[in-house]
Amino acid sequence: MKYRYSIAIGASLLMFVVYFVTNKNVPATAQTATSDSPSFVVPESFSSSEQLGKLAFSAKCQSCHGENALGNAELAPPLIHKIYEPNHHSDEAFQVAVLLGVRQHHWRFGNMPPVEGLTKGDVKNIIAYVRALQAANGIF
């Protein structure tokens, strides 16, 4: 009798796990705002490191992640999104993503390749820029 309950409980747990693993809330594409969108805010000014980060972002990241990190519905997600808030994706996660690339896990854009030609300092400045945009848009 205990054996049957164990099997039933085990099967239920397995179905629960399979459901949540296969039904993650994974957006199919980036739902991008635009710089003209009334809901998007650009800070009035940037610190010197944020300004350097903006330049580096424009040179190395913008072609995929869009202007002001708002995403590109065809290529890459917006970084101005609650998924990338600091308590979910730390600054170090961004460093690793640039250095090693990232396997697809939140979006359906495929894997992100490593980004060549950026130093750790460059990425630190890019992170400062992205975090400033996030903060201006209520993502802490």
Image (tube, helix red, strand yellow):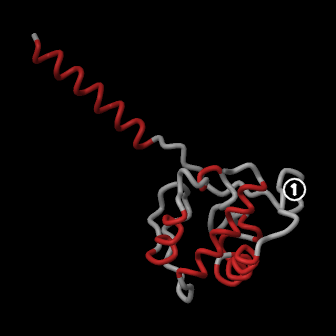
| Placement of the N terminus among the 4 image quadrants | top left
Q: Residue, x 69% and y 64% (percent of image)?
A: 71
Residue 78: % across, % down: 67, 61
Closest to the observer, 59 or 15:
59
Q: Residue, x 77% and y 72% (percent of image)?
A: 47
Closest to the observer, 81 or 86:
86
In the displayed structure image, the side of residue 11 where residue 89 appears, left or right: right
Where on the picture, by quarter, is residue 77?
bottom right
Residue 13, placed above or below residue 30:
above
Residue 40, placed above or below residue 128:
above
Where on the picture, by quarter, is residue 3?
top left
Q: Which element carries disc 1, helix, strand or loop?
A: loop
Residue 110: % across, % down: 51, 66
Q: Which residue is mark 1?
A: 37
Q: Disc 1 residue type?
A: Ser
In the displayed structure image, the side of residue 58 where residue 27 appears, left or right: left
